[in-house]
Structure formats: structure tokens, C-alpha cells
Amino acid sequence: MEQLENLSVVLHAKNDLRLEKRPIPEPGPKEVLLKIDSVGICGSDVHFWQDGRIGDFVLKKPMVLGHEAAGTIFRVGSAVHHLKAGDRVAIEPGTPREIDEHCRSGRYNLSPTLFFSATPPDDGNLCQYNTHDANYCYKLPESISCEEGALIEPLSVAIHACRRGGVTIGSKVFILGAGPIGLVNLLVSKSMGASQIVICDLSLKRLEKAKQMGATFTIAVEKTMTPQELGQKVKQTLGGAMPDISIECTGAELCVQGGILATKSGGVLVLVGLGEPSANIPILDMLIREVDIRGVFRYCNTAIRNLIQPGTCAVLCCR
Ligand code: NAD
Ligand code: ZN
């Protein structure tokens, strides 16, 4: 019989990435062994490779990269009954290790002991075979390729962000940043029923893409722009109205400030972009106008059908 190999992309230290053969792991009773098909390269993979850390997550021992993945079930553990060999699945990289208070309240992404693929010390999926908790593998319908299945992970970040912001039918949404995460927030806002979406970026090329993907208006940010000017520009663009929800996807201090000033009184600013640990923000303006600021850390429950709001991407109803 042909000997199977498990070539894996392993980060040993900052700027030390190696392709090496690892043993094929054995699935535990509640796990599946997957033949990995597609893996997206996220900004965080690049950060770990270039810096050896992201904030408090520090690489201390070799780690396989990759957390945006889909593959085919190769073998199932003895207690797995809802999946079988040959099923193609999207992999949710964050799986709780214990049923703590966060898990019990449904917010398992906040659990401090969460396993998360390709976040030190947990190995990721940029390899040929890997095991994963079967309850966090979602069967893909025939209409969705494994490549698209891998992209459900970044899409989930946007579903969580739009839910945290309360995007619904008729919402006016302002998205700061038109990178991959800003663009998935655009798609999810639209599918949740937003009626007008304004998106801003420094890059005209990225704004062009946003326009193609359905942004109602785009704003080209200039480096010299003040947050007040950005807030005013958004209001002007919306014909004098202010957005109900702003979703910050750059991490830039100017955008956090502009996001607060642009949002209508009583509205919500969702912070997705990972910037500096501290920022100078117009806190009095936020306070007197009751603009709520809500953080986003990855996602939870984005693949559970009955939690998806009406109109949300059908791509996720695949379990
Ligand atoms: P990206 O770098 O591809 O995109 C960021 C965009 O912001 C770029 O298009 C850039 O031109 C734009 N930008 C930067 N400074 C700006 C400014 N001053 N004004 C206007 N636009 C500006 O990154 P991405 O992959 O789209 O991710 C976006 C952010 O989301 C990153 O900070 C990433 O770390 C973060 N992220 C957070 C989570 C989470 O769980 N909170 C999950 C995934 C990604
Ligand atoms: Zn990612």
C-alpha cells in the first residue's frame, strides 16, 4: 500500500518557516482525521512568521500554520456518527477545551483555554492530514468547493461582527477598511438587510473592489484627513444622515476616532481591526451621544442554522 505522507508548513521561530514531514495523527473518539484540501493564508499567519508573535500570543515551540481550512474526512473517531469518510467539511478552528462559564453562556470564543488552530501553542492545518473535533467540522453541500469552504472562516468574523453591531433590515452601515475583513463585512451587512453601506480606505484599488461587491458609497481617505473630517464626509455622503453601525476593520487610530464621530447618537461602533494596545479616542463624544463600542474576538456559533438572522448568507446553512 502507498505510504501516506504528512508534509506540513511548520514555523520554528520568527522568519524560520520549514516544510517537514510529520506523523499522521490518530483521531480521538470524538475527532475526525481530515485530508486537508484548501487553506487560506491569513494576515495573522504572516504576522507569526514575520514577528513570532501577535500581542500576548507568542511562538515558543514549532507550530503548523493555517486556520482557514476545509478538507475531506479520511477517518472518523469511534464516537462520531454525524460524519463519515468522504464528507467534505469546513473546519471551525476554535474549539473549547472545557465547559467554562463562557462556553455555558454560548460565547466559547472568550474561553481562555480555547484550542485555536495556528495560535501558539496549537498547531494549524497547513499540512496534508490533521485531526479536529468532529463537532466543529461542518459538512459542505456539493455546490460549495473546498476553497470556498476555507473562506467560511474569515466570513465568520464578519457574521460575528455584524451580529455584535446589530445589523438588520434597513441599517445604514459604515465600514472602515476595504481589506478582506472589511469586504466580508460588506457582504454580510448586505445579506443581513443593510440598505446603505459606506466603506472607506486609503487604497483606491480596494475601494473599486468594494464598489463591485455592492458598496453604496466609497470614501477615499487621505493620510492628512482628521477624524472630524472623516465623520463629516460620511454624513455628507449619506445626505445628512449618520450610520447606525460602524465597523472598524483597519486597526488605525484615525479610523477608531472617525468611527466614533461618524456613528449616530445611540448607535454602535464595532472594533474588529487589531491595532495598538491603547488608543486616544474622543471618549466624551462617545459618552454624551451614547455610542456603544463593542469588541470582536473571532466568532462563535456562526454555523448554527437557527442562530442565523433571516437573510444571512445561505453558505453557512450547511451543517
Ligand atoms: P488588511 O491589512 O488587508 O486591510 C486593512 C485595510 O485597512 C487596508 O485596505 C488598508 O488600506 C486600510 N487602512 C489602513 N489604515 C487606514 C486608514 N488610516 N484609513 C483608511 N483605511 C486604512 O487586513 P484584513 O485582513 O482586512 O484585516 C483587517 C483587520 O482585522 C486587521 O487588523 C486584522 O488583524 C483584524 N482581524 C481581527 C479579527 C478579530 O477577531 N477581531 C479577525 C480577523 C482579522
Ligand atoms: Zn484569519
Image (cartoon, rainbow, N blue to C red):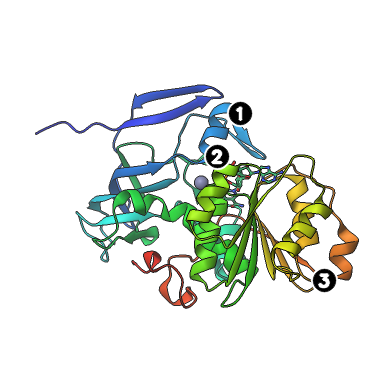
The residue that mark 2 highlights is: 44
Write the residue at 43% across / 67% down: 313
Give coordinates of residue 240: x percent, y percent.
76, 70
Residue placed farthest to the left in the image?
1
Comparing 310 with 136, the one in front is 310
Check disc 1: other Cα within 10 Å, few if <14, some if 14-19, many if 20+. Answer: some
Mark 3 to mark 2 CA distance (whole Å):
33 Å
Give coordinates of residue 79: x percent, y percent.
28, 62
Comparing 287 with 199, the one in front is 199
Residue 284 lies, with reference to residue 222, above or below; the image says below
Give coordinates of residue 170: x percent, y percent.
59, 77
Mark 1 to mark 3 CA distance (whole Å):
38 Å
The residue that mark 3 highlights is: 290
User: Do the CB atoms of the residues marked 3 and 2 lie less than 8 Å apart?
Assistant: no
Q: Earlier in the sequence, mark 3 or mark 2?
A: 2
Image quadrant where one finds the C terminus:
bottom left
Say which element carries label 3.
loop
**Nearest to viewer (mark 1 / mark 3):** 3
Q: Earlier in the sequence, mark 1 or mark 3?
A: 1
Say which element carries label 1.
helix
Would you say the beta carbon of the disc 2 residue lies within 8 angstroms of ligand 2? Answer: yes
Write the residue at 56% across / 55% down: 298
The residue that mark 1 highlights is: 51
What amino acid is at disc 2? Ser
83 displayed left or right of 12: left
Image quadrant where one finds the N terminus:
top left
